Image (spheres, helix red, strand yellow):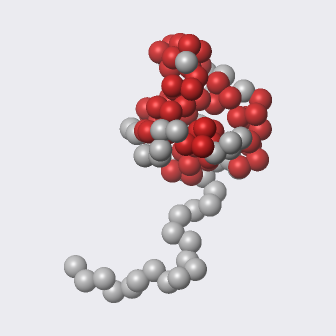
Amino acid sequence: MAVVNQPQSGQLLVQLEGHRDWSTGLCGCFTDCGSCLCTYCCLPCMMCRLASRLNECPLMPYCVPGGGLIAMRTKVRTMGGIQGSICNDCMATTCCGPCVVCQLSREMDNMGL
């Protein structure tokens, strides 16, 4: 098969707006008790594990002060075509970081990451 048309520079390759919601809610921690317990007992370990699952440096949540968790949530939301905004990601991580960590773990499980 020959490539007839190459992508033009400046063309958007993905949609900016997501087409679906998160598969579980922010407060759905008890639907996956293992992640909930791991997050409660060792939040730093769980955040490093999530970064590794996203093919990022395991220490990324701590190397990006104040924004590592926001970056991971935004990456999962973009990869999964989930509706939302960086502002919503920032508010969720600021108000309930451990709940965001659990939600990310569940979402990545559901996405097969």
Depicted 103 relative to depicted 89: above or below: above
Farthest left residue in view: 1
Q: Position of residue 92 (x, y in %)?
A: 73, 35
Location of residue 93 (image quadrant): top right
Residue sitting at x 54%, y 31%:
47
Residue 93 in view in this figure: yes
Instruction: Say whether residue 91 is left or right of residue 51.
Output: right
Q: Quadrant of the C terminus?
A: top left
* Residue 101 vertical placement versus 11 (above, below): above
Is residue 21 in sight in this rendering? no
Quadrant for the N terminus in the image: bottom left
Residue at image coords 64%, 24%: 98
Tell me where residue 109 sits by quadrant: top left
Residue 64 vertical position relative to residue 50 in the rendered view, above or below: below
Q: Residue 83, how many percent across, how many down?
A: 64, 47
Q: Residue at x 51, y 17 (%)?
A: 38
Residue drawn at x 39%, y 85% is 5
- Left or right: 84 with respect to 57? right
> Which residue is more in the foreground, 40 or 36?
40
Q: How many marks?
A: 0
Pinpoint residue 81: horizontal percent, then vertical percent. 55, 50
Residue closer to the observer: 54 or 85: 54
Depicted 67 relative to depicted 7: above or below: above
